[in-house]
Image (tube, rainbow, N blue to C red):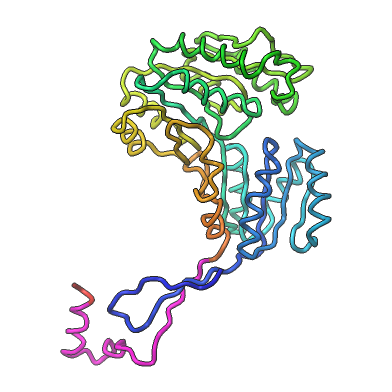
Amino acid sequence: MKAHRAPISALYMPAHNEIQPQPLGVVGIMVPWNYPLFLAIGPMIDALTAGNRIMVKMSEAAPQFAQTFADAIARYFSPDMICVVLGEVEIAAAFSELPFDHLLYTGSTAVGKKVMAAAAPNLTPVTLELGGKSPVIVLDDVNLESVVNRVMMGKTLNAGQTCIAPDYVLIQRQYHDQFIQLAKEWMTKHYPDIEENPDYSRIINVEQFKRVKGYLDALTGGEVHALTTVEPNIETRLMPPVIVSEPAPDSDLMQNEIFAPILPLMHYETLDDAIYFVNSRPRPLALYVFSDNYSSIENVRNNTVSGGLCINEVLIHVAQHDLPFGGVGDSGTGAYHGKAGFERLSHMKPIFVQTKLNGLNLLLPPYGGLFKKAMALFLK
């Protein structure tokens, strides 16, 4: 939080530059339902360390947690430091219209657009952490069993209700059957008796369950491969993982963020084809590439744009406090975590400190030979 020196051109010495971080004021934080503790506490830490006060709107889709969180905050913080707001969708809409000094929203791209529009009349700066279809590119030089292990971990965590969950896999067609078989074996090992398994999450509510089931019911093209013997159950909101091979690129499944344990497998012929497929769609929040070939990895990292990139891994970049976390394009704007979050929620005020002895008077009229010599230095 201390002011620190910044570089200065030799032309202006012996003056010096400083950057002074200052609190923005009141930061609004809108929290989603899928990871309400992590996605409330993370931005709150950044906002508090930057010296701000906070208003937090908890998700109406997880009301019991929201109330518990509000009660806990009230025990340890005064309401003028942290204020937790509860309520339904209309309260969230009114919250986004308040004249905050900064507004941070985590959630879907569609709602993110509404939040940005609501903030615009107040010129409230926003950080939008949105979703997106995070692809996995699998090259044929890696151990497929290892790839399936990491992808299935990421896809089944919280029943796929994770903004950076692997959304679809780009893999050469000859490996589809092997990938599906390995995924079935992985499920048997890690989630036996899935109906009674407390390690496997349920879909958050009936509305979301119907949305997800609708993707499968309306599927055009593609083949659905069940990874367990269990059927979807709207009563318990259990959605067992399935793989869909080669769904139509224009299907709802491939157009919308899935946010559920449904994993499309798409094929590609060359790595350039896979890169083109990713780049022809909205920029994802995360991109995952599995390869042991350095040049192939460099090709992906240099020729794609995504909020974050994991090489031979999924999800774990979000757990790195010293890496900024955020999206780009349709997957969001701005980033936080660690130093990036402190700077995002601070005003980094530039300060120029002049000394008593300086040469700027040489630039004053009348403009003679000395002025021309001084300007020649500037124009070099």
Q: Quadrant of residue 192?
A: top right
Q: Position of residue 290 (x, y in %)?
A: 41, 27
User: Residue at position x 53%, y 14% from top?
Assistant: 244
User: Residue at position x 33%, y 36% from top?
Assistant: 303
Give the quadrant of the N terminus.
bottom right
Give the vertical position of 241 relative to 354 (above or below): above
Give the quadrant of the C terminus.
bottom left
Q: Position of residue 322 (x, y in %)?
A: 51, 51
Q: Position of residue 19 (x, y in %)?
A: 47, 71
Q: Quadrant of residue 31?
A: top right
Q: Residue furthest front?
A: 189
**Residue 366 lies in magenta, yes or no?**
yes
Front one among 293 and 355: 293
Give the vertical position of 326 relative to 147 (above or below): below
| Residues drawn in magenta | 348-377
Q: Is residue 230 left or right of residue 313?
A: right
Give the vertical position of 229 relative to 301 (above or below): above
The number of numbered badges drawn on the structure is 0
